[in-house]
Image (tube, rainbow, N blue to C red):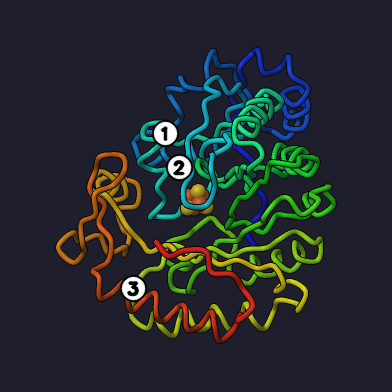
């Protein structure tokens, strides 16, 4: 089993120590032999140890920066929620296809924000604007928040906050199985706890540093027992030799493991693999040996909302994926709610 994340290097903004969470976190990390340094800003971490890009990138993925979230304007987060709630940025996982490699550019280190109350106050304002409609907040747009939450408990705090809210709901997705501290959170059914799942081939070749499928499923069972609304995101759906069988086995494993009560309020989201040209360049730099297929000529270009071409599968391939996975979903989880394919 992948061990819970522990940073090798920590940077802390002095102002973060004025917040109880900042103090607690540093107290928890001190005495563990971790190098803890000061930084004036979480946006200006330079000179990470390492002789070349490859070593510095890996060190960045083991570096935690404890700071304050300054931008309190939330991004939108369609189709899964109205807003992205910023609790952390960055991830210790090494998924070759990860979009964070491009969105975070030269700052692949992990940032956690200690001014959670200010972030939650801002969420409250967005909820008031949309009242009486429900506002959904996605907590995993810029990180795998569960992966660091055993250290910070920021997510747990947010879960309990939305647990008390009439108009707000929280959701997030993870590839990590370290969920134990979240099981007793007072969620009141307002948080949808989702796991990212995939065929064994994809997990084995493209998701190093994350929990294995069986561990994610074990964690999903615990989450269901804690009465959280549960969901699965099959992403990225990736065509490879034997993919139909690979995804069938994944559905079979889920079906064999999930207790009956976990299926009452269960959602599935399907997201196909896509890439952009800048992403391809970054992936080839960070993971030069990757087997990930990134040939634009084999894909269909789709104009993206950030003004850049994305390369998705051809229409025929997309139809085949949609049809195959929908069939498995109907067969194994007929009561589940299918949210979208994108
Ligand atoms: Fe990226 Fe998610 Fe993998 Fe982390 S777990 S590297 S956020 S895809």
Q: Position of residue 248 (x, y in %)?
A: 49, 83
Q: Is mark 3 within 8 Å of ligand 1?
A: no
Q: Considering the numbered disc 1 on the image, is that residue within a helix, a strand or a loop? A: loop
Q: Quadrant of residue 227?
A: bottom right
Q: Considering the numbered disc 2 on the image, is that residue within a helix, a strand or a loop? A: helix
| Residue pictured at 42% horizontal, 23% vertical | 47
Disc 1 from disc 2: Cα separation: 9 Å
Instruction: Tell me, yes or no, whether the two marked residues, 1 and 2, touch with CB atoms within 8 Å.
Output: yes
| Residue pictured at 34% horizontal, 37% vertical | 53
Q: Position of residue 70 (x, y in %)?
A: 55, 19
Q: How many marks?
A: 3
* Residue 80 seen by the camera: yes
| Residue pictured at 75% horizontal, 77% vertical | 259
Dot 3 or dot 2, earlier in sequence: 2
Picture layout, residue 120 above or below residue 98: above
Q: Position of residue 262 (x, y in %)?
A: 73, 71
Dot 1 or dot 2, earlier in sequence: 1
Q: Which residue is mark 3?
A: 239
Q: Which residue is mark 1?
A: 50
Of circles 1 and 2, which is in front?
2
Dot 3 or dot 1, earlier in sequence: 1
Disc 3 from disc 1: Cα separation: 35 Å
Which disc, if any, is residue 58? Answer: 2
Of circles 3 and 1, which is in front?
3
| Residue pictured at 25% horizontal, 46% vertical | 281
Of residue 205 and residue 256, the one placed in the foreground of this image is: 256
Of residue 216 and residue 316, the one placed in the foreground of this image is: 316
């Amino acid at each position: 089993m992948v061990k819970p994340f522990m940073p090798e290097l920590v940077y802390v903004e002095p102002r973060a120590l004025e917040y109880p969470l900042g103090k607690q976190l540093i107290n928890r990390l001190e005495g563990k032999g971790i190098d803890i340094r000061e930084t004036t800003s979480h946006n200006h971490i330079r000179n990470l140890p390492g002789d070349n890009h490859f070593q510095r990138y890996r060190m960045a993925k083991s570096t935690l920066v404890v700071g304050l979230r300054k931008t309190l304007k939330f991004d939108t987060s369609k189709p899964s929620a109205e807003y992205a709630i910023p609790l952390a940025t960055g991830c210790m996982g090494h998924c070759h296809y990860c979009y964070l490699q491009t969105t975070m550019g030269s700052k692949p280190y992990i940032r956690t924000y200690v001014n959670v109350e200010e972030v939650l106050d801002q969420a409250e304002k967005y909820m008031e604007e949309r009242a009486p409609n429900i506002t959904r907040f996605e907590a995993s747009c810029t990180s795998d928040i569960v992966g660091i939450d055993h250290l910070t408990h920021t997510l747990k705090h947010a879960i309990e906050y939305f647990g008390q809210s009439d108009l707000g709901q929280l959701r997030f997705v993870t590839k990590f199985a370290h969920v134990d501290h979240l099981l007793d959170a007072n969620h009141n059914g307002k948080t949808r706890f989702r796991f990212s799942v995939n065929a064994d081939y994809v997990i084995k070749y493209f998701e190093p540093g994350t929990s294995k499928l069986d561990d994610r499923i074990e964690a999903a069972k615990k989450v269901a027992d804690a009465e959280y609304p549960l969901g699965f995101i099959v992403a990225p759906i990736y065509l490879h030799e034997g993919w139909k069988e690979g995804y069938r086995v994944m559905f079979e494993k889920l079906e064999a493991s999930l207790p009956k009560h976990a299926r009452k309020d269960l959602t599935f989201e399907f997201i196909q693999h896509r890439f952009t040209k800048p992403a391809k360049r970054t992936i080839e730099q960070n993971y030069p040996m990757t087997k990930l297929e990134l040939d634009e000529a084999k894909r269909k270009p789709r104009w993206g909302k950030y003004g850049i071409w994305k390369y998705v599968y051809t229409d025929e391939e997309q139809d085949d994926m949609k049809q195959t996975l929908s069939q498995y979903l109907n067969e194994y989880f007929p009561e589940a709610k299918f949210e979208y394919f994108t």
